[in-house]
Amino acid sequence: MTLPEYKVIRSRRRTLGLQVTEEGVVVRAPFFSSEAAIRRFVGDHLTWIEKQKKRVERISREASEVLPLTEAELRALKKEAREDLSARVRHYASLMGVSYARISIRAMRSRWGSCSREGNLSFNCLLMLAPPEVRDATVVHELSHRRHMNHSQAFYQEVLRYCPDYKKTSRWLKEHGAALIRRLPEKTEA
């Protein structure tokens, strides 16, 4: 097989990473990676790249069949998310013995949630279109950052302690998340 065309994005990361999007193949590389090492890395992952291209095509096809939310539907979704996700945060924070500061609900195109060092939590209102167990997993993921502000092994042990099906719910978001994000209107306010 010949190497596909790919775009290289260099940063202060430590390892090489691959991403396949509708726009093509992206290699995320440390500043110090040589072009030869990057080519080798892409060559070693050709089977994975082809599988991901098919997955992206399938998701794109499915997403094109979905209508965008209206502004009124988006406002209603944010209101529902504020109630639902706030209750889940209170429940799991108590269970996990962690604190948090504020909770904000946004319509985000690239994240399902985030946790700042100050303990501010932010969640994507589109989580309301996902199964309840996916919402639980996202809340547990963000609250686990109150103990570990990274994605280390200790962090994932914490997540799995409170959400044993985390891998399954994470897979659900990877498979269906793009279709949910496509439901956002072209212009949305955060």
Image (cartoon, rainbow, N blue to C red):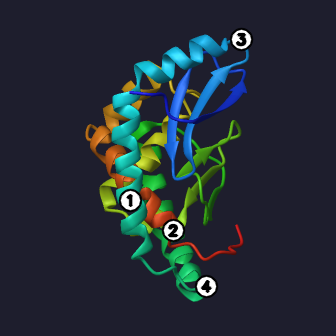
Q: Is residue 141 left or right of residue 133?
A: right
- Name the mark nearer the viewer: 3 or 2: 3
Ranked by sequence position, the earlier of labels 3 and 2 is 3
The residues tagged by marks 3 and 2 sit, at their Cα atoms, a distance apart of 36 Å
What is the x, y in percent for residue 185?
A: 60, 77
Element at badge 4? Answer: helix
Residue at numbered disc 4: 71
Ranked by sequence position, the earlier of labels 1 and 2 is 1
Residue at numbered disc 1: 59
The numbered dot on residue 182 is 2
The residues tagged by marks 1 and 3 sit, at their Cα atoms, a distance apart of 34 Å
Amino acid carrying label 2: it is Arg
Element at badge 2? Answer: loop
Amino acid carrying label 1: it is Ile
Q: Is residue 113 left or right of residue 176?
A: right
Tell me the quarter of the image containing the C terminus: bottom right
Using the image, determine if residue 49 lies above or below residue 30.
Answer: below
Amino acid carrying label 4: it is Glu
The residues tagged by marks 1 and 4 sit, at their Cα atoms, a distance apart of 24 Å
- Name the mark nearer the viewer: 2 or 4: 2
The reply to whether dot 3 and dot 2 touch (C-beta < 8 Å) is: no
60 or 178, nearer to the observer: 60
Using the image, determine if residue 96 lies above or below residue 78.
Answer: above
Ranked by sequence position, the earlier of labels 2 and 4 is 4
The residue carrying pointer 1 sits among few (fewer than 14), some (14 to 19) or many (20 or more) residues within 10 Å by Cα, namely some
Residue at numbered disc 3: 32
The residue under the point 46% across, 59% down is 178
